[in-house]
Image: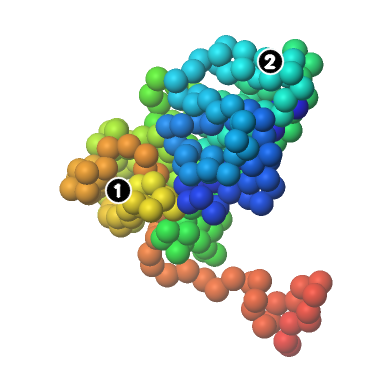
């Protein structure tokens, strides 16, 4: 049996209770060493086999899993954040399906949630933005043309941009080209929820400048949108004049 587990955004205590139990009871753990906090492995069983997938190929990961299956061992595939985002889990699951190896998936706290917590931020403010666009700049992994930064920027919705810290000058240009004003609020959150977390409030125009000033070149999320500052409308959720199935509003 294989358990895909989201390790959370960085802080050791942000893995879920279920995820922690799975890691601690596993016979084999394959963890994404480039981003997963290694302290999460401190309570693994003494005889647990631990592999760092940062140094492995997909084929090598599958080989470890297959060998564990032959011995009746339980494997945890430990991914950063929640593996549904940029986690490359589908290709692993498809191979396991073809090999008739059972697996399940335990979600985790994504870094985009950790970044919001670091900023005390609500991504969806009434009359500002009710949508969150999660995307990335094209790198070695291409982005479909219809999902360009410019096309998403045209909505002026809240944007959370992964895997793009090394391309901030280009990102700023493309955000402005798409429709954001240069002075639109933006934030850089480095290693959200880790002990060395950094958070910088800036504007779309000054993203590259502020990242350079703070020595940030990777492992950061970029957040763009007017939810970072400014006015918004009160929600209807707790409006005394708004009727819900749980309470009657004032007349």
Q: Residues within 10 Å of mark 1 (few under 14, many from 20)?
A: many
Q: Is residue 49 above or below residue 214?
A: above
What residue is drawn where x is 51% and y is 15%? Answer: 57
Q: Is residue 162 above or below residue 52?
A: below
What residue is drawn where x is 45% and y is 64%? Answer: 120
Furthest residue toward right: 245
Q: Quadrant of the N terminus?
A: top right
Where disc 1 sits, the SS reads loop
Distance from Cα at disc 2 to Cα at disc 1: 47 Å
98 left or right of 172 in image: right
249 left or right of 189 in image: right
Where disc 2 sits, the SS reads helix
Residue 41 in the image: x percent, y percent? 54, 40
Pick the residue in front: 65 or 251. Answer: 65
Residue 73 in the image: x percent, y percent? 72, 25
Residue 43 in the image: x percent, y percent? 58, 44
Q: How crowded is mark 2: few (under 14 residues within 10 Å), some or many (20 or more)?
A: some
228 left or right of 30 in image: left
Q: In which quarter of the image is the C terminus?
A: bottom right
Furthest residue toward front: 46
**Marks 2, 1: nearer the viewer:** 2
Q: Name the residue under label 1.
A: 204
Pick the residue in front: 86 or 102. Answer: 102
Q: Name the residue under label 2.
A: 66
Furthest residue toward bottom: 251
What residue is drawn where x is 67% and y is 15%? Answer: 67
Indicate the quadrant where residue 21 lies.
top right
Residue 228 in the image: x percent, y percent? 40, 60
């Amino acid at each position: 049996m294989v358990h895909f587990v989201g390790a959370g955004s960085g802080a050791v205590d942000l893995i879920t209770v279920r995820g922690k139990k799975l890691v601690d009871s596993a016979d084999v753990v394959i963890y994404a060493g480039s981003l997963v906090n290694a302290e999460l492995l401190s309570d693994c069983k003494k005889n647990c086999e631990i592999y760092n997938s940062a140094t492995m190929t997909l084929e090598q990961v599958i080989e470890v899993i297959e060998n564990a299956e032959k011995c009746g061992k339980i494997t945890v595939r430990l991914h950063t954040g929640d593996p549904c985002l940029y986690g490359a889990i589908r290709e692993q699951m498809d191979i396991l399906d073809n090999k008739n190896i059972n697996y399940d998936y335990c979600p985790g706290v994504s870094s985009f949630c950790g970044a919001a917590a670091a900023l005390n931020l609500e991504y969806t403010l009434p009359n500002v933005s009710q949508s969150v666009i999660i995307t990335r700049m094209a790198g070695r992994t291409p982005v479909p043309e219809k999902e360009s930064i410019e096309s998403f920027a045209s909505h002026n919705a809240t944007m959370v941009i992964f895997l793009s810290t090394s391309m901030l000058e280009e990102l700023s240009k493309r955000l402005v080209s798409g429709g954001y004003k240069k002075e639109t609020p933006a934030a850089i959150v480095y290693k959200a929820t880790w002990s060395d977390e950094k958070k910088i409030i800036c504007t779309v125009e000054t993203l590259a400048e502020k990242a350079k000033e703070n020595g940030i070149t990777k492992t950061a999320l970029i957040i763009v949108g007017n939810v970072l500052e400014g006015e918004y409308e009160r929600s209807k959720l707790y409006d005394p004049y708004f009727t819900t199935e749980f309470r009657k509003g004032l007349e």
